[in-house]
Image: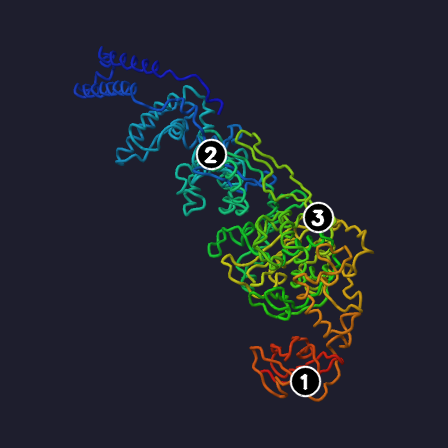
């Protein structure tokens, strides 16, 4: 404080004066001043002699004390002037009014001038601590003597008799040891301090540095902690409570078992204030009767804990831990505390049900403003203080597998390469590993890779739009191959994902969540789609001031165009298409918000350890995750069932504040090259019946899809994708649609001539459920067969292209099944069938 800068106290001069007074007084006693007292006429001589001895002894001791005081080493008054008072850092919400957390090392302290401390607090403190504060010289001899007597009789140092000035000296310059030497030092320095500084300056120091319990120091910190108001705004009863605490802050804590003792001391202080004239009798009566509400202890301690520690980590990495703990920084964050409370309420509302019904013990949620990148809400777990679920771990910044929520980055990469939202690929069981045969469509045992869809079905030809909206896996793997793993990772990285550093570590599983990402970064990356391709990295701080009010840093927007606006708009259009996602999720699912333009995507990992949902409008993006911190699996349900209801509950609240029904995504521009595009890019999967049914690699060059050139037969995936399409065509009919009579190649043949029969399983036989069984046929040597297709209950099961045309088949279920074999010969297709029982 500036008022500490004064001239040094000339202690040697004052000590000399004290010695002179002592010598003069002793001389007066020696020359008979006492003998002239009237009391000598009636006091016995022996008693008079005794009194004289006591007086002489007192002044002798005083002389010894003066001599000792002249040589004792005590702290300089300059130490008081030049000391550094630690102040704790405060983290606020975006309004600057709500304290989220007080970052402290040894203390929590905020200094304020006396003018900003309620007179009630000042008077209450003086009344209970030092009623003669404004009159005494920093030391009260009578109070000191009373304390000495009490200490002697109690054989200890339980009473201090200290003035407020002495307590300031003790707190600022001396140790807390209760020794005679330390007490003498305290008295000397208090006398000095009272001569150098005004009463207001001393009281201001006392109120800013006094302890109020635990790590709470200073009346401003205590006022905020206990009542949620500044020291200038406390009322009379609150002020009395604050003055009561320093005597025994732990014992008298309002959160402990001795609240009645605290109440009694508060009333004692009010009584003393009345007696000293600081308050009227009516004010006293009202204050005694007032029911003061203390803040909930957890509310007083920390709000949005995962967010504040996210901010604290940032501050310590930039400014150092000492500056954060003791530097008195004022940190205004981006957090909307009202929205944060909504987020916490939504998580709490669904937490128990999610654990009971889905074995999901933890959830996280984060909200970001796409236009600025500012983090508006962050819930890092269902309960920060729950050690059973590692609740202190912030799942919004933890690495987890994203499941299908990664797919939009892959589709965006494909769109950048020239594909369109209406591009068609086939959703069929497909073998993608070139280490296995194209005919091994159902083998997913390494090194084979044949992913399935969640519902176990395959939909045939699908547009990018429908495949993304319904989150089909096989089309997504094909889109990743078309887009390229390396380029897809680059897109994700450009949008803000930092955890996928090396493309060589990932294969085609990446699109189904094979990498690890952070929920905060995923939500920030989706915000790029919401913001027309402009990235604003997620940030949590608006301003940091030092204790003197100097601005150390301030939010500066760091916007960058990282995605073509047309691509962003196409992704928005696809992810907000409720008609397209209806076949998978229903028309009125938790992903749908009537009247609002909301784009969203779910994600579920194959092992059901993570479920995600991330959605956005142009004004807010919200991501949510559920699972178990120990990585144990949940129930086998998709994210739309597990986490989407909780996410929907929060987004419904957020939309009322951060979006409106007129807040719509810009419409994608028409494709100028639409007429010249290959038909497969425009939704026509069967554009040339003369050429048959094929997947996209047959029709276009994946590296230049708009070139008009045909596919490359030497492409490693060419045969693998086309094989199941041929099986599908054989089973599903004409070339003009996906339904119709089975007249395609390999289907709908004439009854077989004598000699073409199924030899395994035989008519009426029984096979066991579980293991695959062998299907085989016999035929005359004159029958020139090129391939045999096997159908179980009219669904394609296998195709064998080499004699003797056997195949391994998996039973579909229990009971009677029909096996049909269709042979392709030079004279057309012939077929035969048999029935058998699975048990």
Q: Position of residue 678 (x, y in %)?
A: 78, 59
Q: Specify whether 126 is left or right of 589.
A: left
Q: Residue furthest top?
A: 31
Residue at mark 1 to residue at mark 3: CA–CA distance: 69 Å
Q: Quadrant of the C terminus?
A: bottom right
Whether residue 746 is situated above or below residue 645 in the rendered picture: below
Residue in the image at 38% along x and 20% along y: 192
Tell me if residue 474 comes above or below residue 195 in the rendering: below
Report the front residue among 486 and 87: 486
Direction left: furthest residue = 46
Residue 459 on image: x %, y %? 70, 68
Mark 1 and mark 2 residues within 8 Å of each other at the beta carbon: no
In this view of the protein, which residue sits in the foreground, 638 or 675? 675
Could you tell me which secondary element the residue under label 2 belongs to? loop
Q: Nearer the viewer, mark 1 or mark 2?
A: 1
Task: In the rendered structure, find residue 46 and report the number of the disc placed on it.
Answer: none
Q: Earlier in the sequence, mark 1 or mark 2?
A: 2
Secondary structure under tag 1 reads: loop
The residue at which mark 3 appears reads as: 618
Q: Residues within 10 Å of mark 2 (few under 14, many from 20)?
A: many
Towards the viewer: 267 or 725: 725
Residue on which disc 1 sits = 781
Q: Which is nearer the eye, 571 or 313?
A: 571
Which numbered disc flags the more N-terminal residue, 3 or 2? 2
Mark 1 is surrounded, within 10 Å at the Cα level, by few (under 14), some (14 to 19) or many (20 or more) other residues, namely few
Q: Which residue is mark 2?
A: 218
Q: Are marks 1 and 3 in contact (CB under 8 Å)?
A: no
Foreground: disc 1 or disc 3 = 1
Mark nearer the N terminus (1 vs 3):
3
């Amino acid at each position: 404080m500036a008022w500490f800068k004064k001239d040094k106290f000339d202690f040697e001069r004052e000590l000399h004066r004290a010695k002179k007074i002592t010598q003069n007084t002793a001389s007066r006693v020696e020359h008979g001043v006492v003998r002239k007292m009237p009391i000598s006429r009636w006091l016995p001589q022996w008693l008079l002699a005794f009194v004289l001895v006591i007086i002489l002894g007192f002044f002798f001791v005083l002389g010894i004390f003066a001599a000792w005081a002249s040589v004792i080493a005590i702290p300089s008054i300059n130490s008081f002037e030049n000391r550094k008072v630690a102040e704790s850092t405060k983290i606020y919400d975006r309004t600057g009014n709500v304290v989220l957390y007080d970052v402290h090392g040894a203390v929590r302290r905020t200094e304020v001038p006396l003018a900003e401390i309620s007179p009630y607090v000042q008077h209450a403190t003086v009344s209970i601590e030092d009623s003669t504060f404004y009159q005494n010289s920093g030391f009260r001899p009578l109070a000191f003597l009373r304390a000495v007597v009490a200490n002697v009789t109690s054989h200890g140092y339980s009473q201090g008799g200290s003035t407020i000035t002495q307590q300031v000296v003790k707190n600022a310059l001396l140790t807390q040891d209760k020794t005679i030497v330390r007490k003498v030092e305290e008295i000397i320095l208090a006398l000095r301090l009272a001569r150098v500084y005004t009463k207001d300056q001393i009281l201001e120091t006392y109120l800013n540095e006094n302890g109020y319990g635990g790590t709470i120091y200073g009346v401003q910190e205590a006022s905020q902690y206990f009542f949620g108001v500044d020291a200038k705004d406390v009322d009379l009863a609150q002020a009395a409570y604050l003055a009561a605490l320093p005597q025994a802050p732990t014992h008298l804590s309002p959160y402990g078992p001795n609240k009645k003792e605290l109440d009694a001391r508060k009333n004692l202080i009010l009584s003393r204030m009345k007696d000293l004239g600081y308050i009227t009798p009516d004010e006293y009566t009202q204050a005694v009767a007032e029911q003061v509400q203390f803040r909930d202890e957890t509310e007083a301690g920390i709000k949005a804990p995962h967010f504040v520690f996210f901010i604290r980590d940032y501050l310590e990495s930039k400014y150092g831990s000492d500056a954060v703990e003791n530097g008195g920084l004022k940190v205004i964050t981006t957090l909307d505390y009202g929205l944060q409370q909504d987020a916490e309420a939504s998580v709490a509302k669904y937490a128990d049900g999610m654990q009971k019904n889905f074995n999901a013990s933890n959830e996280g949620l984060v909200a970001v403003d796409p236009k600025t990148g500012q983090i508006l809400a962050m819930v890092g777990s269902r309960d920060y203080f729950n050690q059973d679920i590692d609740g202190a771990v912030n799942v919004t910044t933890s690495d987890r597998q994203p499941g299908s929520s990664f797919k939009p980055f892959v589709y965006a990469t494909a769109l950048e390469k020239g594909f369109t939202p209406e591009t068609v690929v086939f959703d069929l069981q497909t073998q993608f590993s070139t280490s296995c045969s194209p005919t091994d469509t159902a083998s997913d045992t390494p090194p084979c890779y044949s992913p399935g869809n969640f519902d176990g079905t395959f939909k045939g030809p699908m547009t990018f739009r429908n495949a993304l909206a319904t989150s089909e896996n096989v089309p997504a793997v094909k889109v990743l191959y078309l887009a390229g793993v390396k380029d897809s990772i680059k897109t994700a990285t450009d949008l803000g994902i930092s955890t996928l550093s090396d493309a060589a570590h990932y294969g085609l599983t990446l699109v189904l969540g094979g990498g690890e990402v952070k929920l905060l970064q995923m939500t920030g990356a989706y915000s790029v789609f919401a913001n027309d391709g402009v990235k604003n990295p997620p940030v949590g701080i608006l301003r940091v001031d030092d204790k003197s009010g100097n601005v150390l840093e301030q939010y500066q927007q760091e916007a960058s165009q990282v995605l073509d606006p047309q691509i962003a708009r196409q992704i928005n259009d696809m992810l907000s298409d409720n008609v397209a996602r209806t076949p998978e999720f229903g028309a009125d699912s938790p992903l749908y918000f009537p009247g609002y333009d909301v784009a969203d995507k779910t994600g579920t990992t194959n092992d059901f350890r993570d479920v995600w949902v991330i959605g956005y409008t142009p004004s807010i993006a919200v991501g949510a995750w559920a699972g178990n911190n120990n990585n144990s699996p949940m129930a086998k349900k998709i994210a739309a069932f597990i986490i989407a209801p909780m996410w929907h509950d929060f987004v419904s609240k957020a939309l009322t504040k951060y979006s409106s029904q007129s807040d719509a995504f810009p419409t994608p521009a028409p494709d100028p090259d639409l007429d010249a595009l290959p038909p497969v890019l425009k939704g026509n999967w069967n554009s040339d019946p003369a050429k048959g049914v094929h997947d996209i690699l047959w029709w276009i060059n994946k590296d230049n899809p708009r070139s008009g050139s045909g596919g490359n037969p030497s492409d490693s995936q060419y045969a693998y994708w086309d094989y199941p399409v041929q099986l599908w065509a054989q089973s599903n009919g004409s070339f003009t649609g996906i339904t119709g009579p089975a007249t395609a190649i390999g289907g709908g043949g004439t009854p077989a001539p004598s000699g073409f029969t199924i030899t395994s399983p035989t008519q009426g036989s029984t096979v066991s459920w579980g293991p695959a069984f062998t299907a085989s046929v016999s035929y005359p040597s004159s029958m020139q067969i090129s391939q045999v297709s096997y159908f179980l209950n009219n669904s394609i099961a296998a195709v064998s292209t080499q004699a003797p045309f056997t195949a391994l088949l998996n039973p579909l279920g229990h009971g009677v099944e029909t096996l049909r074999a269709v042979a392709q010969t030079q004279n057309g297709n012939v077929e035969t069938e048999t029935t058998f029982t699975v048990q």
